[in-house]
């Protein structure tokens, strides 16, 4: 998305804070995750404090499921980020998303989420859900900018520290290109 103009939104009022040229990682590609990526993904998840910390075996096991989608963003043979999701009938859930700390805010997470959303649109998924810590305002703003809305709360869902999870939902049938919120953060 090199050169594409985006608008940044922060907070509940969604004020425009600034316009920016979204450079992204122009040579990065999003591809299907392979079992051989599991060790690198485990390390990436371990270094991302907001992500669920999965073992290498759990990562490999998740790739065997028919309903699971997993993608990586890669540049110069280096995995920059990953996303996992699962689908049941006409609903899907984003299970885990992580980007290397020094590479954040460069469009990698956005590219991964949009990629999985497009895949699910092709599979006739109607709704996509995810859970996020209520204190993770950056993630909430990010997902809201991609068209997700809070639809519920899970009390004391997270441990260490104990915290509620907000349940976010997005209609998969929303057109990604014409949604005025897409491209904002």
Image: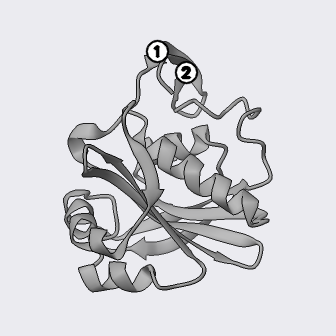
Q: Residue 20 bears which disc, if any?
A: 1
Q: Residue at x 44, y 74 (%)?
A: 156
The residue tagged with tag 1: helix, strand or loop? strand
CA distance for labels 1 and 2: 6 Å
Estimate the x, y position of residue 53 in percent, counting from the top left: 28, 71
Q: In the rendered image, which residue does mark 2 sit on?
A: 6
User: Closest to the observer: 98 or 62?
Assistant: 62
Estimate the x, y position of residue 153 in percent, counting from the top left: 58, 66
Estimate the x, y position of residue 95 in percent, counting from the top left: 48, 69
Q: Residue at x 52, y 64 (%)?
A: 131
Q: Residue at x 22, y 64 (%)?
A: 40
Q: Is 42 situated above or below 6?
A: below
Q: How many labels sit on residues?
A: 2
Which image quadrant for residue 177?
top right
Q: Of the residues under marks 1 and 2, which one precedes in the sequence?
A: 2
Q: Are marks 1 and 2 in contact (CB under 8 Å)?
A: yes
């Amino acid at each position: 998305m090199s050169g594409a103009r985006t608008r940044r939104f922060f907070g509940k009022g969604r004020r425009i804070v600034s316009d920016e040229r979204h450079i992204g990682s122009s040579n990065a590609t999003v591809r299907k995750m392979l079992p051989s990526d599991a060790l690198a993904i485990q390390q990436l998840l371990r270094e991302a404090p907001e992500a669920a910390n999965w073992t290498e075996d759990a990562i490999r096991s998740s790739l065997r499921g028919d309903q699971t989608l997993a993608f990586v963003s890669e540049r110069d043979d280096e995995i920059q980020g990953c996303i996992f999701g699962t689908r049941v009938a006409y609903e899907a859930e984003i299970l885990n998303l992580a980007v290397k700390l020094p590479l954040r805010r460069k469009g990698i997470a956005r590219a991964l989420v949009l990629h999985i959303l497009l895949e699910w649109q092709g599979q006739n998924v109607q709704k996509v859900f995810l859970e996020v810590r209520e204190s993770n305002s950056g993630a909430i703003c990010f997902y809201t900018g991609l068209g997700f809305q809070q639809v519920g709360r899970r009390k004391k869902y997270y441990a260490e520290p104990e915290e509620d999870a907000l349940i976010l939902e997005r209609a998969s049938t929303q057109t990604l290109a014409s949604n005025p919120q897409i491209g904002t953060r």
